Amino acid sequence: YMALSRSGPLGGFGLLFSPGAMVIAQVIIVTPLIASIAHQTLRDLWAEYHDLLISMNATRRQRILALIWDGRRALLTAMLAGFGRAIGEVGAIMIVGGNIEHVTRVLTTAIALETAKGNFAFAMGLGLVLIGLAVLVNLAIHIIGRTERASQW
């Protein structure tokens, strides 16, 4: 918030209470989570495949591609963890976005607003929509994973 406010270093861009500020906040929140899971995955794979890749005289590019390919499921898990963190974020989005109707109001901030207004039935309905979105994403990932496993022998 302070970086995006008028007196902050990015204040001249006028991003506060805009969708751009919301994207910046989400990236700041989600990046460390995804990076730490991806780093741990690739580090573990490197420890496992290091000698093999070196003995095969693989180029740096080939080694990186091999590690990414073998760690694709774990990297997908990292992205899903980031998505789960982002889709449930309320605080940072409300602070930098302002929850302005038709501009920066998103599902999670609408749930918080409706709950604060005492409109619990509508808030529960929005919550069910949010849960439905999460279930659809997980179902899609499951189907993709099953299709990938079916193509293997």
Image (spheres, rainbow, N blue to C red):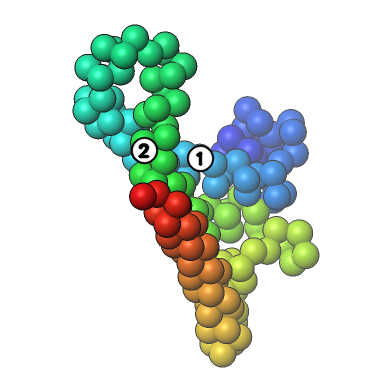
Q: Position of residue 21 (x, y in %)?
A: 65, 44
Q: Does residue 118 appear anywhere in the picture?
A: no
Q: Residue at x 61, y 68 (%)?
A: 107
Judge from the rendering whether residue 23 lies leftward or rightward of residue 84; answer left or right.
right
Q: Position of residue 93 (x, y in %)?
A: 57, 55
Locate residue 15: give its quadrant: top right
Q: Nearer the viewer, residue 142 or 128?
A: 142
Q: Nearer the viewer, mark 2 or mark 1?
A: 2
Query: What label sits on residue 18 in the rendered view?
Result: none
Q: Nearer the viewer, residue 98 or 71?
A: 71
Judge from the rendering whether residue 79 lies leftward or rightward of residue 109; answer left or right.
left
Q: Amino acid at mark 1?
A: Ile
Query: What label sits on residue 28 in the rendered view?
Result: 1
Q: Does residue 117 appear anywhere in the picture?
A: yes
Where's the N terminus, which quadrant?
top right
At numbered mark 2, what does the secondary structure look like: helix, strand or loop? loop
The residue carrying mark 2 is: 71
